[in-house]
């Protein structure tokens, strides 16, 4: 290599190093700005040489990982990689880099083009047990802005790689990218794939997409009606009862696809097959017309569309908005009390799904004494009240889908039934045996609450919940969505994407930040404890740290949480948690997230009381954290 070429490689490696410093590599996904020009909101489809090298390095390290699995415990042929992307403009350009590298590194590749995240994972799961190692690489940055992109990796268990395996990939990737000759080596791999194999892979895209859709459709039906204890069933099948309910009380669902990967997925066919009427807007793949994250104002187009559909056909009472990769979606509803459509908060959505799926277990005759709900650390305490009504337990892991899924798997190995899990703070519902969030099953959970009603003296799902929660005053036969929502335990939680929930902190060492915060909190507690007792019935507190799948309660030093979640639960006189405040630096975005959660005070209107307490607590939390950050900054 000549001197000029060496100099060029050195410059490129410096640029790669700088680009990597701006990326977030975590078990939840590898994400950064990929669009040429470096703009977060750029709609450019091209990527520069630096991002080409990064994409090639990610492909190479995953190929190496799969070959390692073949050597260790899965003898067979060449590893198989399933590949696909969401609808971001840079997805195709990244795939055009990764596929040749995977082929050049001795992998077979099936490329399905645009697929939803749950779709590619169901496709991979359908190949579980095949000879050799099989995995998937999914090109997506989930809910990040359109100029971002990234990667998710997994095998055939239906979800992303566990955190400990992803950390191995990250370490290998960083090591590879630090090698002096890595840009030159990776560039050779990009152009070194067998041309015939590459043509064959790309020409089979339509067939691969068809296979992915088929696997996803079949798996979605399995998830929807899974019976954890089939032997306990007597005569009724919940799927049949559901369909009869839909015939008696027609149900319509609408969707704002917002140009996401779900535009070309199974949604319309899946709901239509259940007898649910379906309507949609923004169905053109890649035509992303508003902010990707399905929160706040991003739900307004769907809300307005639902109102329009409902006025034409009163059966339409539900709507959903997915993010770009289609693994989460928040809801809008027709509220018959208000006579208008409105959005549901993410925490409400998850709570309703929990009621539906725990009631599903009870309806099917399962014993719930060892049933569990697994959630992330900022999920509202409302879930604890719901689980208690059914006799189930709640377990919490650090924020991150891989952590929640991993903890659920660990609990199942211990004999727990974990039908539902997810990140309640983002409305992300995961219904076993799925291991990924899926808006289809979120919508279906609410549909089951409305449609599986009392038949032949056997209580329906909502009737089961009303009885167990003691809310028998809501027992009118013609109940609707407003009644279901009114039955929720009265909690208010800070929305994960509201301005109040987002902070920019200077402290890079979050353990030190939390240590400083502890001194401030203890001082403030002494000053406010009498007021908190008198106003909100708060008598004590307990701090907990969340790191990966581990929860450590009653910690003595807040800094033990490190970069993980720190939650302070406020307790009443009986030791029951009635409110909480929480903090954690995001692993996928450059922000520091905070949250407050509160139950309505006794003797006051529950909803307004809960929101008043939450507002007070979130303001207090912001002030304490910013004071702690200033202390760290000035040291």
Image: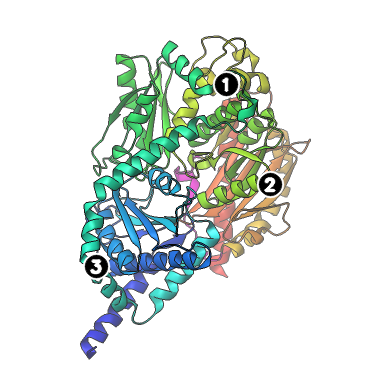
**Rendered-image quadrant of the C terminus:** bottom right
Tag nearer the camera, 3 or 2: 3
**Magenta-drawn segment:** 495-509
Q: Nearer the viewer, residue 522 or 95?
A: 95
- Decide: few, some or many residues near mark 2? Use Cα within 10 Å; few <14, some 14-19, many ≥20: few
**Rendered-image quadrant of the N terminus:** bottom left
Place of residue 336 in the rendered image (x, y in percent of width and height, measured from the top left) = 44, 15
Q: Is residue 503 magenta?
A: yes
| Secondary structure of the residue carrying numbered label 3 | loop
Q: Can residue 171 be seen by looking at this rendering?
A: yes
- Decide: few, some or many residues near mark 3? Use Cα within 10 Å; few <14, some 14-19, many ≥20: few
Return the residue at label 3: 194
If you read the primary sequence from the N terminus, does the residue marked by circle 3 or circle 2 appear first? 3
Place of residue 170 in the rendered image (x, y in percent of width and height, measured from the top left) = 46, 66
| Secondary structure of the residue carrying numbered label 2 | loop
Return the residue at label 2: 414
- Using the image, determine if residue 314 lies above or below residue 634: above
> At x 46% / y 71%, what residue is drawn?
172
If you read the primary sequence from the N terminus, does the residue marked by circle 1 or circle 2 appear first? 2
Q: Nearer the viewer, residue 382 or 460?
A: 460
Left or right, 59 with respect to 567, comes to left
Quadrant of residue 603 within the rendered picture: top right
Left or right, 604 with respect to 212, comes to right
Label disc, if present, on residue 524 of the rendered structure: none
Place of residue 443 in the rendered image (x, y in percent of width and height, measured from the top left) = 44, 29
- Using the image, determine if residue 398 lies above or below residue 38: above
Q: Can residue 506 be seen by looking at this rendering?
A: no
Tag nearer the camera, 1 or 2: 2
- Decide: few, some or many residues near mark 1? Use Cα within 10 Å; few <14, some 14-19, many ≥20: many
Question: CA separation, marks 1 and 2?
Answer: 27 Å
Q: Is residue 207 magenta?
A: no
Return the residue at label 1: 461
């Amino acid at each position: 290599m000549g001197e000029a070429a060496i100099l060029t490689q050195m410059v490129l490696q410096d640029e790669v190093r700088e680009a990597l410093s701006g990326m977030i590599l975590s078990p939840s996904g590898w994400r950064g700005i990929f669009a040429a020009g470096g703009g977060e909101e750029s709609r450019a489809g091209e990527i520069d040489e630096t991002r080409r090298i990064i994409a090639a390095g990610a492909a190479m390290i995953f190929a190496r990982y799969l070959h390692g699995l073949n050597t260790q415990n899965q003898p067979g042929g060449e590893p198989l990689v399933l590949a696909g992307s969401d609808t971001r403009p840079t997805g195709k350009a990244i795939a055009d880099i990764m596929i040749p590298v995977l082929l050049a590194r001795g992998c077979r590749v099936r490329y399905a083009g645009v697929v939803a995240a749950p779709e590619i994972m169901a496709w991979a799961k359908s190949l579980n047990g095949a000879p050799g190692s099989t995995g998937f690489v999914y090109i997506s940055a989930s809910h990040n802005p359109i100029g971002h992109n990234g990667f998710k990796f997994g095998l055939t268990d239906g979800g992303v790689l566990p955190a400990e395996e992803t950390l191995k990939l990250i370490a290998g990737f960083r090591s590879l990218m630090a090698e002096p000759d890595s840009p030159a080596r990776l560039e050779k791999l990009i152009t070194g794939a067998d041309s015939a194999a590459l043509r064959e892979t790309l020409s089979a895209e339509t067939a691969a997409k068809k296979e992915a859709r088929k696997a996803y459709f079949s798996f979605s039906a399995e998830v929807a009606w899974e019976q954890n204890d089939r032997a306990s069933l007597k005569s009724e099948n919940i799927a049949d009862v559901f369909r009869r309910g839909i015939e008696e009380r027609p149900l319509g669902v609408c969707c704002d696809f917002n140009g996401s990967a779900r535009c070309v997925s199974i949604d319309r066919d899946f709901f239509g097959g259940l007898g649910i009427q379906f309507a949609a807007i923004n169905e053109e793949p890649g035509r992303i017309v508003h902010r990707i994250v399905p929160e706040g104002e991003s739900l307004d187009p769907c809300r307005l569309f639902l109102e329009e559909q409902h006025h034409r056909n009163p059966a339409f009472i539900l709507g959903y908005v997915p993010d770009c990769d289609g693994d989460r979606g928040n809801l809008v509803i027709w509220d018959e009390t208000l006579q208008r459509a409105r959005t549901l908060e993410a925490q409400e959505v998850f709570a309703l799904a929990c009621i539906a799926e725990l009631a599903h277990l009870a309806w099917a005759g399962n014993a719930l004494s060892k049933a569990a709900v697994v959630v992330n650390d900022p999920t509202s305490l409302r879930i604890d009240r719901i689980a208690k009504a059914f006799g189930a337990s709640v377990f919490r892991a650090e924020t991150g889908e891989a952590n929640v899924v991993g903890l659920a798997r660990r609990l199942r190995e211990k004999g727990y039934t974990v039908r539902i899990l997810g990140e309640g703070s983002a409305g992300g519902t995961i219904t076993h045996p799925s291991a990924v969030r899926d808006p289809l099953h979120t919508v279906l959970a609410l549909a089951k609450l409305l449609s599986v009603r009392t038949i032949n003296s056997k209580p329906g799902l909502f009737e089961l919940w009303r009885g167990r929660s003691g809310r028998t005053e809501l027992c009118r036969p013609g109940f609707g969505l407003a009644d279901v929502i009114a039955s929720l335990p009265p909690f208010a939680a800070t929305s994960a994407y509201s301005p109040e929930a987002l902070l920019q902190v200077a402290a890079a060492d979050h353990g030190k930040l939390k240590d400083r915060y502890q001194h401030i909190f203890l001082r403030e507690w002494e000053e406010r404890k009498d007021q908190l007792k008198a106003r909100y019935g708060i008598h004590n507190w307990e701090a907990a740290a969340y790191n990966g799948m581990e929860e450590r309660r009653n910690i003595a030093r807040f800094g033990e949480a490190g970069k993980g979640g720190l939650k302070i639960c406020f307790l009443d006189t009986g030791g029951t948690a009635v409110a909480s405040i929480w903090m954690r630096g995001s692993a996928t975005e450059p922000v520091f997230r905070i949250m407050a959660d509160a139950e309505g005070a006794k003797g006051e209107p529950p909803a307004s009381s809960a929101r008043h307490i939450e507002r007070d607590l979130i303001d207090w939390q912001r002030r304490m954290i910013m004071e702690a950050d200033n202390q760290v900054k000035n040291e």
